[in-house]
Each structure stands twice: as C-alpha cells, then as structure tokens.
Amino acid sequence: MTDLEWVPQSCALPTEKQPLRIAEWDALFSEHLTALSYPAARRVRLELSAASGVEDGVRDLAGRESGCCSFFTFTVTADADAVRLDIAVDPVHQPVLDALAERAAGLAGLGEQR
C-alpha cells in the first residue's frame, strides 16, 4: 500500500499537503506509540509516551485532522504515564481506521494488534 492509497476520498486536505500530514502521523507513531488496542467497535486506542510536548502535539494534530477528515472523532486523555488517543469512526470508514491502526502498529514495531 502506498502512502496515499489508504487516504479516503472524503478527506478534504489538499492532495499536495497529504504527504506532510502522513509524515506527522508517522513520526508520532514511530517515536511515541507504546500500545494499541480496540476497546470497542469502530474505535482504536493509541497509547503514547508521556514525554514532554507529546500531549500538546497530539491535541494539535488531532485538531487539524478533524478539520479535513470530519469522519474521525478524536478523544485525547493524559496522565503522568501516557497520552491516550481514542479514534472513532462511523461504519463506512472502518477500513480507514483499520489501515491507520495497521500503519501505526507497523511503524511502532508492535506487530499484529487485533
């Protein structure tokens, strides 16, 4: 799968900006993702390190992503141990969520997560 192949057509981010956004997500996943789970149908939870600046970065990135891909619902929670990013979608966008989770797990070296 190419970098842009999994991006849904309903994404409103201009095509020329999509590789930059993907690179931001990739950096977040490869540098800070520590665990991934599926706590409910059509929802994935990403646990990220609580390193300095991670929570602010996650909130910023999730906010910008909401602006172009309104089918995502992002919830960020944090404590001293981790930053948690819950991502939910409607049934139509389940394949997009699955592709995102697969990409995240692969970049973080987490292996199969389902």
Image (cartoon, helix red, strand yellow):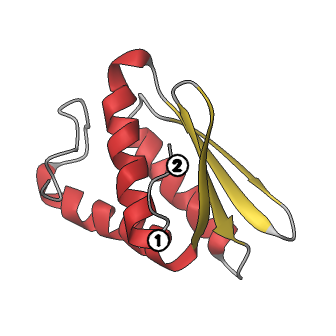
Above or below, comparing residue 18 to residue 74 in the picture: below
How crowded pointer 1 is (Cα within 10 Å; few <14, some 14-19, many 20+) is rated as: many
Label 1 residue SS = helix
Q: Which mark is residue 108?
A: 1
Q: Mark 2 and mark 1: span between their CA atoms?
A: 22 Å
Determine whether 10 is above or below 54 in the image.
above
In the image, residue 11 above or below residue 56: above
Q: Residue at (31%, 69%) from the top-left corner?
A: 23
What crowding class fits label 2: few (fewer than 14 Cα within 10 Å), some (14-19), or many (20 or more)? some
Q: Is residue 55 left or right of residue 73?
A: right
Residue drawn 35% across and 26% down? 93
**First-in-chain label (2 vs 1):** 2
Which residue is labeled 2 in the image? 63
Q: Is residue 38 visible?
A: yes
For the residue labelled by badge 2, is the local secondary structure a helix, a strand or a loop?
A: helix
The amino acid type, in three-letter code, at marker 2 is Gly
Percent position of residue 80, x then y: 87, 70
Q: Residue at x 74, y 74 (%)?
A: 50
Q: Is residue 68 visible?
A: no
Q: Could you tell me the amino acid type at mark 1?
A: Ala
